[in-house]
Image (cartoon, helix red, strand yellow):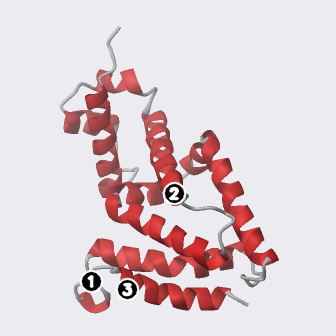
Amino acid sequence: MRVRDADKEKLVIEMAIDQIVRDGFQGFSMNKLAKACSISVGTLYIYYKDKDDLIQKIGAVTALQFFTSTVKNFSPKMSFEEGLWKQWENRAAFTMKYPKEVAFFEIIKHSPHSEIILDSIKEFADFRMIMKEFIDNGLRNKELVPMTFEAFWSVAYGPLYTLLNLHTEGKSMGGKPFKLTKEIMKEAFSRTIKALKP
């Protein structure tokens, strides 16, 4: 039986993410991945049962990294404004450090693999509970206006993700060069927090 090679496995993950971000699921295959990694297709099956298993395992690793980084130095007991700013900082830091992984996660999130991946991650349930407690505390302390979850999410995080998309593309509307700074982030955050507070 062939032994797993950690460096080879890391290369497979990087190349799979690259290919899925570039070509989508339709353009992704085990054969293309093996060729990009300069390994045999058989080697891939040491690590993964099939293409779906590969996508789901890589998706789970990426999701776990994201959820872990999102709650770094964050507590659901923080004031709503302080906690939301920490969320913005953490989400921005992760997106700027791992833009391909974030693009990959966005593709996965809108695929049939999404529920399977999220259900496989115990920490995702913890993440949901932490965020629910944070929002409940904001409502109870009258730091947050009541609204549907979808409206909350779009107002609380939509501006940040728009700025991060512009940053990742390196340009603003009309093609003007753009780099996200803490000052721009704080400017958008101040308007966001005003919209969310009673």
The residue where tag 1 is placed is 178
Q: Earlier in the sequence, mark 3 or mark 1?
A: 1
Name the mark on residue 126: none
Amino acid found under the numbered disc labelled 1: Phe
Give the residue number, with chain letter if any, for mark 2.
72
Can see residue 110? no
Give, as a three-letter code, the residue at label 3. Answer: Glu
> Which residue has dot 3 on it?
183
Question: 8 or 84, which is in the foreground?
Answer: 84
Residue sitting at x 34%, y 79%: 166
Residue 26, above or below 103: above
Residue 182, placed above or below residue 76: below
Locate residue 88, reporting x and y percent. Answer: 49, 72
Q: Are marks 3 and 2 in contact (CB under 8 Å)?
A: no
Quick one: SS at disc 2? loop
How far is disc 3 from disc 2 in space, using C-alphas? 21 Å
Query: Where on the picture, by quarter, is residue 191?
Result: bottom right
